[in-house]
Image (spheres, rainbow, N blue to C red):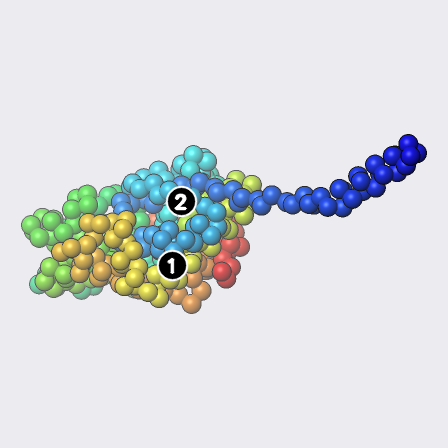
Amino acid sequence: MKKLLPLLAVIALLTLGGCATPPTDTPTVPTVTPITVAMGFIPNVQFAPFYMAVEKGYFTDENLEINFDYGWETDLLKLVGTGELRFAVASGDQVILARSQGLPVVYVMNWYRKFPVCIVSFKEKGLQRPHDLIGKTVGTPAMYGASYIGWRALLHIEGIDEDQVNLQNIGYTQVASLTEGQVDAAVCYIMNEPVQLKQSGQEVNVIAIEDYVNLVSNGLITNEQTIAEEPALVQSLVRAVLRGLRYTIDHPDEAFEICLKHVPEAGGENAPQQMAVLHESIKLWRADDLGRSDPAAWEASQRFMIELGFADTETDIEQMLTNQFIVEP
């Protein structure tokens, strides 16, 4: 009987082993990456594609936790170039300027297909063409940035000397300065002040810079280090923003309602005006190949920047922009 005990013990162990539940793999929880995008402006319906990407879960689909850092665009590209920021929304002309200063910033997604700067004036002033501005007082929000570069490019392409126009720095008071008669015309963004004036019942003339010179405009910016070390992160962000951009263009009414969650002051009595701002913005964004940059446009813009004296060093276009992250969702 004693001889049978070891055999019975082995059989018991084998039986228990056969009944044991095999180990299962623990589901892997995706790592969520917090990310900050500097917007270069205050909360606004013009950021609808980003708000859409938040509310539709496009950032969540990419395991991104997005934070918007609002403020003016001054020094944004310096912060991106030095690595203090990884992502920002900024204009292409500022990228060209930053690269000429040795900052390794890279434009990774085109957003505005048309340059949005314009010159607006009341219709009774009769300022319909650039040469009509000669001898007039024109207000500009600043003597730097996309508005100023657009203004200088317009004068350059039309052969107008700077001293033929009285240019005044008026800050961001274009509507008030025009209404109070302080200036004859003002440099602004075509989807902002002209829309405000029209919605208030004013008749205006608009001289669009893009009708005279093709300058690259706003898009998503990062730096060479982020592209080299975290290409998947750049791809995820671009993909989410592009989805938001496509949906906004196709569903402007829904996009506006979503904007109100992020910009509540755009609602109420301001809703008609702000809805018009969104529709005017979409005209500048719409394209068959959303997100993709045209190297030829960048070459032309850089030549203008050098001719105007804003940039003194020519940069290889392939260093300042890339289309590698523009893929179908």
User: x, y percentage for residue 125?
Assistant: 10, 61
What amino acid is at disc 2?
Ile
- Mark 1 burial class by Cα count in 10 Å: few <14, some 14-19, many 20+: many
User: What secondary structure is found at the residue carrying circle 1?
Assistant: helix
Mark 1 or mark 2: name the one nearer the start of the chain.
2
Quadrant of the drawing holding the N terminus? top right
Q: Is residue 215 above or below residue 7?
A: below
User: x, y percentage for residue 130?
Assistant: 22, 60
> Where does label 1 land, which residue?
245
Q: Is residue 318 above or below residue 125?
A: above
User: x, y percentage for residue 182?
Assistant: 9, 48
> Where does label 2 land, which residue?
66
* Left/right of residue 34 with respect to residue 309 in the rendered view: right
C-alpha separation, residue under disc 1 versus residue under disc 2: 16 Å
What amino acid is at disc 1?
Leu
Q: Quadrant of residue 171?
A: top left
User: x, y percentage for residue 168?
Assistant: 17, 45
Which residue ends up furthest to the front in the rendered image?
A: 1
* Left/right of residue 11 with respect to residue 208 in the rendered view: right
Residue at (42% x, 67% y) in the render:
288
Tag on residue 314? none
* Residue 185 visible here: no
Q: Is residue 157 above or below residue 87?
A: below
Number of callouts in the render?
2
Residue at (88% x, 38% y) in the render:
7
Instruction: Give 20 or 187, whichever is nearer the viewer.
Output: 20
Instruction: Give 102 or 32, whichever is nearer the viewer.
Output: 32
* Left/right of residue 253 with respect to residue 314 in the rendered view: left
